[in-house]
Amino acid sequence: MNNVDTVIHFAAESHVDRSILDPQVFVQTNIMGTQVLLESAKKHNVKRFHHISTDEVFGSLKLGANDKFSEETAYDPRSPYSASKASSDHLVRAYFHTFNLPVTITNCSNNFGPFQDPEKFIPRMVTNLLTGQKVKVYGDGLYVRDWLFVEDHCRAIDLVVHKGEVGQTYCVGGQTEDLTNLDLTKKILKIMNLDETNIEFVTDRPGHDRRYAVNWSKINTDLGWSPSDSVDNRLKETVNWYKENENWWRPLKEKSESIYQK
Ligand code: TYD
């Protein structure tokens, strides 16, 4: 980090299902790894350390309720993944308060878009369908996520890094209407002109968080950020990208599917 002025810390183990199969590597990368970066940033007087985190640190909301996570919500992580991210957030704040390291944090909702590993739900579903397999919907499919297009997320990070206030946290979310995994699956099937016989309900994830929703009014009010287009349009773009870029995802597909056989 010699002569580095800004660090944007994206590096993480990020998949909940993998954290259930092997929690240790999440502790190693997300907690220990973050502390290593913080220490180096402190040593080299980095001018800004921006930490990318997740809404999953706040735990799980009730299905059908109206409440949302915000910067004020108490931490209540429930998977090895979210517990490791919560821990890293605490370390980042500790370096701010104890050592005056100029930090900012963003807690984002579920990302989607081009170049996402096919282990994650949307690319897994699209690449399954493109290879003649069914969409694997966990449990009853009535789980809610707040979907954020990757470029909107990147715009939010850019704003916080350039205009955000040091020591502050900003929540970044996507569309504000609750959308269940099952309804999301139906949207993708429709975009791909396929019917609902392509849905397969499979065993649920242990400890599966029911609902995430993010109140992003702070970053909207303070920095003028908002999502740039509808989820429907962004889903169409994303499906097209996977259709046109099989050479990118094909080598990753077998490896990403192997975890689901365990
Ligand atoms: P995922 O992309 O793993 O993100 P996260 O667990 O961090 O929210 O999963 C998004 C949602 O989709 C989550 O409720 C689990 C569910 N899911 C399925 O129903 N089937 C799948 O094949 C996958 C990967 C996820």
Image: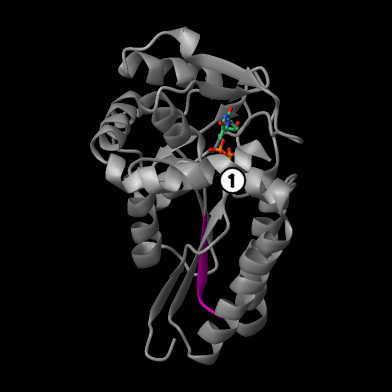
Image point (59%, 45%), residue name: 55
Image point (60%, 71%), residue name: 34
User: Which image quarter: residue 131?
Assistant: top left
Residue 50 in percent (x, y) is at: 47, 67
Q: Is residue 172 visible?
A: no
Q: Is residue 105 covered in magenta?
A: yes
Residue 30 or residue 163, whichever sits in front: 30
Q: Is residue 228 visible?
A: yes
Q: Is residue 228 covered in magenta?
A: no
Please tell me whether residue 88 is drawn above or below residue 225 in the rendered image. below
Residue 170 or residue 2, whichever sits in front: 2
Query: Which span is picked out in magenta?
Result: 100-106
Relative to 1, is 114 on the left or the right? left
Q: Quadrant of ligand 1?
A: top right
Image point (43%, 81%), residue name: 47
Sort mark 1 into few (<14), some (14-19) or many (20+) by Cα contacts within 10 Å: many
Relative to 254, is 189 on the left or the right? left
Please tell me whether residue 116 is drawn above or below residue 187 in the rendered image. below
Residue 231 in percent (x, y) is at: 36, 28
Please, what secondary structure does the residue beneath circle 1 have?
helix
Image point (61%, 72%), residue name: 33
- Check disc 1 and give the amino acid type: Asp
Residue 39 in percent (x, y) is at: 59, 84
Relative to 86, is 189 on the left or the right? left
Q: Which residue is mark 1?
A: 55
Residue 88 in percent (x, y) is at: 65, 65
Please tell me whether residue 84 is drawn above or below residue 94 in the rendered image. above
Quarter of the image containing the C terminus? top right
Q: Ligand 1 within 8 A of label 1's CB?
A: no
